[in-house]
Image (cartoon, helix red, strand yellow):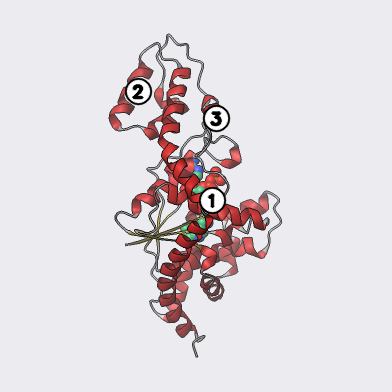
Amino acid sequence: MRVLSGIQPSGSLHLGNFFGMMKKMIDYQEHEELFCFIANYHAMTSLSNGKELATGTLEAAANFLALGLDPEKSVFWVQSDLPEVQELSWILSNFTPMGLLERCHSYKDKVGQGIKPNHGLFAYPVLMTADILLFQSDRVPVGKDQKQHLEVARDIAIKFNNEYGEVFTLPEPEIDDEVATVPGKDGRKMSKSYGNTIDLFLDEKPLRKQIMQIVTDATPVEEAKNPDSCNLFQIYRLFLDEASVAELRQRYLTPGLRYGDVKQELFETVRDFFAPYSEKRKELLADPQGLRKVLAEGADKARYAADKTMRKVRKKVGLGY
Ligand code: ADP
Ligand code: TRP
């Protein structure tokens, strides 16, 4: 089974990104054919600083590789290294009813927020469709916010296939309800836009500060506490095995637990958990040429798969004359 997902390069990473998406993708490489790319064309819809985009792209690559993505076991590349995806996007635009895009929530939400829409933002789901169909992806793991874009991809694929025969694999979305939303410091979904994140790859001091800011209730020390309504517990449990979660739960239920102590333990756990990855990340970023080489090799592998699709598509639509 071919699993594909794209990630926009965005500055810093938090525990929500790691447990909600990256870890799952990295685990896939052991059992499935994993295609994973950095969606830098998509990032242009919200970022116009070229330097920032270029740096962010290399950082995103270093993040994934440091956290365990193995370019030998997967296909890992930067979207813009395969400009053929733009050609497919144009071809697919001709099978995309305006209404389909006009109905997209993420587009409507941005317009609602007062962002002046341009064609890039409007056509975003078509490019995403091209990403998916170019590689004949069977399954696409995404967050809930991307669900509708997957429906668009399927609609476009069906329209195209109706016209020309079974050219594209119909992708199945994988929207994981099991990976419960990782809560942030204030209990809402952890998100950059809420400013409630606990970040990966921080130095000790700012990391400790973020963890100490986790909001807890005012239950006195001498009373039992409720683990299920506690953010701190919900975040800590992500790092623990079943037996340790049960043990922590028991400590909550026993009077005497101090939230400050649990925060200190969580700080040490997070620090120690990411320390080796952080070292690896530093090494990778210190050698940008090495990173570019890994990405170029990944692009070669991706191109091989993309060419197969594009030859078929060009012929069908009449561009190969
Ligand atoms: P942010 O909300 O911080 O801007 P992004 O939208 O860049 O995060 O997140 C990229 C991906 O990381 C999402 O598609 C989603 O799969 C995952 N993700 C982000 N935040 C969380 C969270 N709090 N819990 C679970 N997964 C998350
Ligand atoms: N739009 C996705 C996001 O913001 C990123 C993305 C681009 C993607 N192309 C994709 C995800 C193709 C899955 C498949 O999260």
Q: In whole angstroms, how far apart are the C-alphas of marks 1 and 2?
A: 37 Å
Q: Vertical placement of 270 versus 217: above or below?
A: below
Outermost residue toward the top in this view: 222
Q: Nearer the viewer, residue 242 or 175?
A: 242
Give the number of the mark in front: 1 or 2: 1
Q: 288 or 137: which is nearer to us?
A: 288
Q: Quadrant of residue 243?
A: top left
Q: Which residue is mark 1?
A: 59
Residue 111 makes an appearance in the image: yes
Q: Is residue 105 above or below residue 304?
A: above
* Circle on res. 249: 2
Is label 3 in a helix, a strand or a loop? helix
Labels 1 and 3 touching (C-beta < 8 A) = no
Q: Amino acid at mark 3?
A: Gln
Q: Which mark is residue 210?
A: 3
Viewer-closest of 211 and 253:
211
Q: Which corner quadrant holds the N terminus? A: bottom left
